[in-house]
Image (cartoon, grey):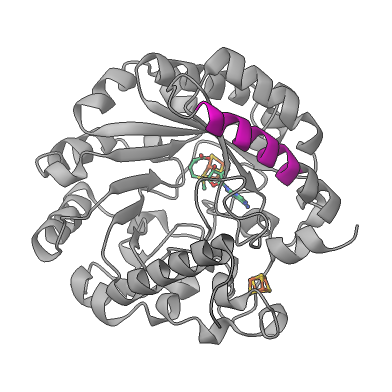
Amino acid sequence: MMATTPWEVLFDNWKRRIDTLVKEHPLQIISWEATRRCNLKCVHCGSPAEAVNHNEELTTDEIVGAFEQIANDFDMAGFRHINITGGEPFVRKDLLEVLKRINKWPFYRNIDIQTNGVILADHPELFSELKLYGVTGLGISIDGLENTHDDFRQMKGAFAKAYKAAHLGVKHGYVVTVSLVAHSKNVAEIPEFFQMVKDEIKPRVFRIMTIDPIGRVEHDSQYMLSSEQLRRVIEFLRTEYQQSCATYFDPSVTMVEMGCGGWMGKELEGMFRPMIFHCIAGINNLGILYDGKLGSCSNISRDFIEGDLRSDRIRDVWENRYQRYRNYEWKKTGECAECDQWNYCHGGPMHKRHYNGDMCDCLFNNYNENG
Ligand SMILES: C[S@@+](CC[C@H](N)C(=O)[O-])C[C@H]1O[C@@H](n2cnc3c(N)ncnc32)[C@H](O)[C@@H]1O
Ligand code: SF4
Ligand code: SF4
């Protein structure tokens, strides 16, 4: 059917760009799960340390070798960035060494690290060192006011350390994102917390992710957002995002946005984050997991592993597998089967899928439900 309104045209153009991206699947982002070890034991962790064999972690030479192989085998002209996550990346003693060794390739000099901030706060010398090796962005998780954060992260003093790390990150000139996971016990304090962060830390981005029923909270509904709570979060985001857009060109202003919880419908997409959502896992985003398995973001079930860099050539896997990430028809089950959002959403983010195709949580439906 022909698009009729400018808004429809916008979405149709965007959809065409997604189709092209899927067809061409250029490697643009590498998500490296540096380790599954962690110095915290957060109640919600979607990538928990238990149930994995830490002895299988890639060695320094193996991970540097993987980055070298990618540099040799792929067209890196459109490469955008490396996102390092975990587990807690800073528990890897050789993190700086890895960064130093891959720094000789210029396209590996735009690196973000997602962290709980504890080790950074205790080792402030890291802020100068990371800069030498291409780290430009720091994502620091802070999930609410002091007591809420410390309870959620199960460590007294975790808030103070994360707060300090975020402060120091801004002071040292990094693009700092303060990331908050919105859950049933912190929704009420988000506005107050945001005000504090905006006034005192002044990060470039304040990002809210909605809690997913995965990992340690897969079977624990007490932290999940009700529809009413989700609507409050979105309303907050909508108001603050639009205000922050008005001052976008001032780098001292904190931009507000939502992370990748899922498609929210044409009325909302583009209104509370600087993008229209589509899951990019396995499309332009390659994941190297802690043990060399090839997937995408570390929160995606290990049922969706496509290869192993210890035995496969990464480019072969990227070109010839990843069909489950690029052809979505298999996701058309359950709520998605009859959904009128399908043509844009294509079944939501991969990290919400189980191996049998079931989906654990649809943000769009939750938002639109009563209750
Ligand atoms: C797995 S952590 C790894 C990096 C680092 N250890 C940290 O906590 O920031 C990456 C991000 O995923 C978020 N996360 C973990 N479990 C989640 C869940 N069940 N739902 C939504 N976000 C989650 C964390 O809060 C953090 O911001
Ligand atoms: S969310 Fe991050 S800090 Fe918390 S247990 Fe998971 S990996 Fe560790
Ligand atoms: S039901 Fe499926 S297709 Fe519809 S909005 Fe939810 S995840 Fe997307």
Queried whether the magenta region covers residue 314, the answer comes back as: no
Q: Quadrant of the N terminus?
A: bottom right
Q: Nearer the viewer, residue 229 or 271?
A: 271
Whether residue 117 is visible here, answered yes or no, is: yes
Q: In x, y percent, where is residue 32?
A: 34, 52
Whether residue 282 is visible here, answered yes or no, is: no
Q: Nearer the viewer, residue 105 or 64?
A: 105
Q: Quadrant of the C terminus?
A: bottom right
Position of residue 188 relative to residue 63, above or below, is: above
Q: In x, y percent, where is residue 229?
A: 81, 47
Please name the predominant secondary structure of the magenta segment in the image.
helix
Magenta range is 233-247
Q: In x, y percent, where is residue 230?
A: 77, 50
Q: Residue at x 61, y 45 (%)?
A: 272
Number of marks in the rendered image: 0
In the picture, measured across the screen, residue 249 lies left or right of residue 148, that is left
